[in-house]
Image (spheres, grey):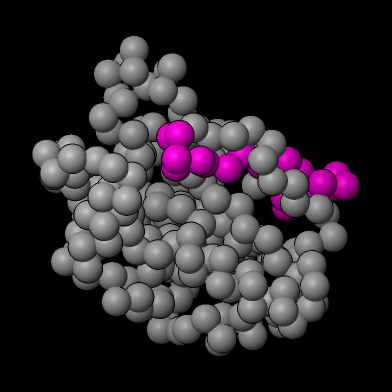
Amino acid sequence: MTETTDIPALADLLQARATEGRVIVAVVGAPGSGKSTLADKLAGKLNARQAGLAAVLPMDGYHYDDTYLTPKGWQSRKGAPHTFDVGGLYHTLKRMRARDEAEVAVPVFDRQIEIARAGARLIPASIPVIIVEGNYLLLNQEPWPRLRPMFDLTVMIDVPEGVLKSRLTARWVRYGLTPPEIAAKLEENDLPNGRLIRTNSAAADYRIANA
């Protein structure tokens, strides 16, 4: 049964679990739900308590590149489940769980240029709490379920669709998209993806309201 929590309580739980070894937590939510912000706040709170306690691994770094998506006719659906390298993320998580390397380099998505930068973040083996944030980490659609055993704890961010739409509209305005481009992004990609996440994800251990 999913329990409701908040960032301070979640930080307490992860700090306690980290005394037993590395803990990998999945933070899941629709586009615009605030996954990156929540993950960064949670890591910041943990690192303020103890330096080097937590690091963030963003799922967006595993976007397929436009040089692959465009010939496939998928560029306009970038961000949908089939536009990610799930296998690459899976093997990164296996390396994280093994914890037998001094550090693991992970990609980070640069939204300004819509490109994932390879090796943009290094996560040392000494860091016990890994916060993985992304849309589809609990998706009940192949090949995503193979990721689930990699997570010790899962959290779903719950945000009403109206709030998501407002946030996403503001995001695309900031990136200079025109009103027709924004409408297409929302109605053909972002909002359908959000509905898929809400209706076809495994139940999380915890829920955080982020309205």
Residue that appears at 40% across and 77% down: 208
50 left or right of 3 in image: right
Q: Can you give x and y, in whole percent of width and height, for residue 62 in the image?
A: 52, 37
Q: Can you give x and y, in whole percent of width and height, for residue 167 in the image?
A: 27, 61
Q: Can you give x and y, in whole percent of width and height, for residue 65 in the image?
A: 46, 25
**Which sits in the foreground, 125 or 39?**
39
Q: Is residue 7 visible?
A: yes
Residue 31 on the magenta segment: no
Q: Can you give x and y, in whole percent of width and height, for residue 156 in the image?
A: 40, 68
The vertical placement of 14 against 82, above or below, is: below
Which quadrant of the structure image shows residue 22? bottom right
196 left or right of 3 in image: left
- Please provide the residue range marked out in magenta: 96-114
Residue that appears at 55% across and 50% down: 58
Which quadrant of the structure image shows residue 201? bottom left
Residue 105 on the magenta segment: yes
The quadrant of the rendering that contains the N terminus is: bottom left
163 left or right of 114 in image: left
**Which sits in the foreground, 6 or 110?**
110
**Which sits in the foreground, 178 or 126?**
178
The quadrant of the rendering that contains the C terminus is: bottom left
The vertical placement of 126 against 108, above or below, is: below
**Which sits in the foreground, 51 or 72?**
51
Residue that appears at 38% across and 69% down: 157
Q: Is residue 196 visible?
A: no
